[in-house]
Image (tube, grey):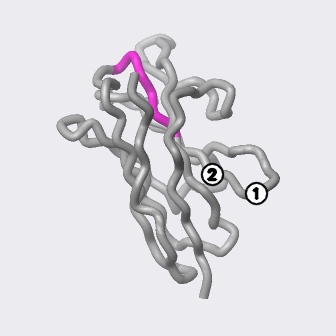
Amino acid sequence: QAPLVESGGGSVQPGGSLRLSCVASGYTDSSSCVGWFRQVPGKEREGVASIVIAYSRSGGVYVVDSWKGRAAISQDNVRNTVYLEMNSLKPEDSGMYYCAAAGAFQMGRSRLCPRLTPENYNNWGQGTQVTVSA
């Protein structure tokens, strides 16, 4: 599969919003997930949100607790693009944001993404920088 491609980063003031995009060519059905991660220098990448591709049932979307209410993940299946909408941004949200892919799995009636840790995801993009400062 081609590497994922992120865009949409930039500089924003505290309280502002950004929408990041991840073009996930080749990931077109619910066998796949895309996750968003943030990394700051010297620290491991930490998960933000994940989504099962082309799947609209409950459980296909996950946002980590620290981002709930401020981040939303969505997809445009025609454009093969996954979005991360971030609101009420804080300086500590600054960092390089990456998207990556993983295989989805079935649990009961739901399709789910694997745990949002870097080792469960692959085919990383090059990242897009987000800077939140006054």
| Most distant residue in the bottom direction | 134
Q: Amino acid at mark 1?
A: Pro
The residue under the point 68% across, 26% down is 119
Numbered circle sitting on residue 41: 1
Q: How many marks?
A: 2
48 or 22, nearer to the observer: 22
Whole-percent x, y for residue 81 in the image: 31, 42
Query: How far apart, in angstroms, are the residues tagged by discs 2 and 1?
Result: 10 Å
Write the start and end of the magenta stretch as one range: 30-35
Q: Residue 77, located in which quarter of the rendered image?
A: top left
* Residue topped by disc 2: 38
Magenta run includes residue 43: no
Left or right: residue 64 versus residue 84 is right
The residue under the point 55% across, 62% down is 129
Q: Secondary structure at mark 2?
A: strand
> Dot 2, how many residues are within 10 Å of its Cα: few (below 14), some (14-19), or many (20+)?
many
